[in-house]
Amino acid sequence: MIGLGRMGANMAERLLRGGHRVFGFDPDPAARTRLEQQGGVCAASLAELIAKLSAPRAVWMMVPAGPVTDQTVNGLEPLLSADDTVIDGGNSNYHDTLRRAAALAPRGIHYVDAGTSGGIWGLAEGYSLMIGGAAEIIERLRPVFATLAPAPDRGWGRVGPVGSGHFTKMIHNGIEYGLMQAYAEGFSILEHKQEFGLDLHQIAEIWRHGSVVRSWLLDLTSDALGKNPKLAGIAPFVADSGEGRWTVAEAIELGVPAVVITQALLERLRSRDNDSFSDKLLAAMRNQFGGHAIKSE
């Protein structure tokens, strides 16, 4: 396991609990110490990590998408041999995955993309794994995937050739954008109906059982509202990891209308504009054509 941040550490711990031996590397010595305390074996460098593994090796990366993944793959390439496998469990763009797989293929090094969902709850609940790569290699790694998943026979599977795992995870995250936006807008309408004095946490709890909108995301929403009903101290700023943008770009490329996902992405971008020029200009236009009052800052 390369990358022992919070999610990588949780995955390593789940594997250790499942009886697997886990060897790990992270640039942060504290992260390596945590893995050793859990029963894993740590290395101080990529070279040392690979030297500890028996062939054919399987190396799982949990590092940020983009340049860090490229740097890690480039560092691994001269250390690995034919029939070794690199598994990318991060949120890489599938185009980058295809490029990396093609670069390793001449040396007979396999590349597997494991789109991974589950976040901080994966240790207890298991991870949803959308896996792309050669069928025989994924079958070889079945014990690992079956241990990380919610159950050996569900929550994971090979969805297609290399690249398809990250592509599927990209769409998964795009759908997530839309679901989150719908919940956020619905609860906002409820919150604004002040004369009813609605208890949003109570409503979320009601919806969690028997309702057609029940979901794990609603479970988490209810938990958040129970802990902080007025969302005090939370800034109205919503980040994005990039996968929503990639999903919208892919929809445009394929000519597929993705109205809800696109609008959800735009709402996230809008949340970051604390000094909206466009809104100021709208107010100015209303004043110009209709004499509507302008509210001063």
Image: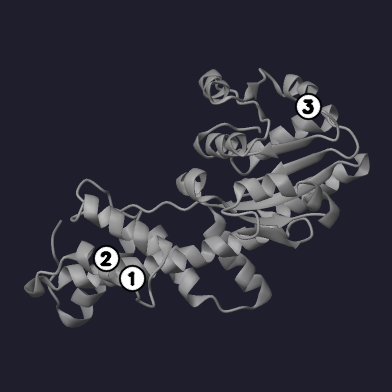
Residue 197 is labelled as: none
Would you name the residue on which mark 2 appears?
205
Q: Quadrant of the N terminus?
A: top right
The numbered dot on residue 209 is 1
Q: Which residue is mark 3?
A: 53
- Give the residue type that dot 3 points to: Leu
Going from N to C along the chain, the mark reached first, 2 or 3, is 3
Residue 179, given in percent of the width and then of the height, sits at 43, 68
N-terminal of the pair, mark 1 or mark 3, is: 3
Task: Return the residue found at the far left.
Answer: 195
Real-space CA distance between mark 2 and mark 3, rounded to the nearest whole angstrom: 48 Å
Residue 292 placement (x, y as % from top left): 14, 77
Tell me how the rendering is colored: one colour
Instruction: Give how far across and how far down residue 247 sits, in percent.
Output: 58, 64
Instruction: Indicate the quadrant where residue 181 lies.
Output: bottom left
Q: What amino acid is found at the position of numbered circle 2 in the picture?
A: Glu
Q: Give neighbour class at mark 1: few <14, some 14-19, many 20+ (Cα, 10 Å).
A: few
Residue 123 lies, with reference to residue 255, above or below; the image says: above
Cα distance in 3D space between marks 1 and 3: 47 Å
- 294 or 49: which is nearer to us? 49
Q: Residues under labels 2 and 1: Cα distance?
A: 7 Å
Q: Quadrant of the C terminus?
A: bottom left
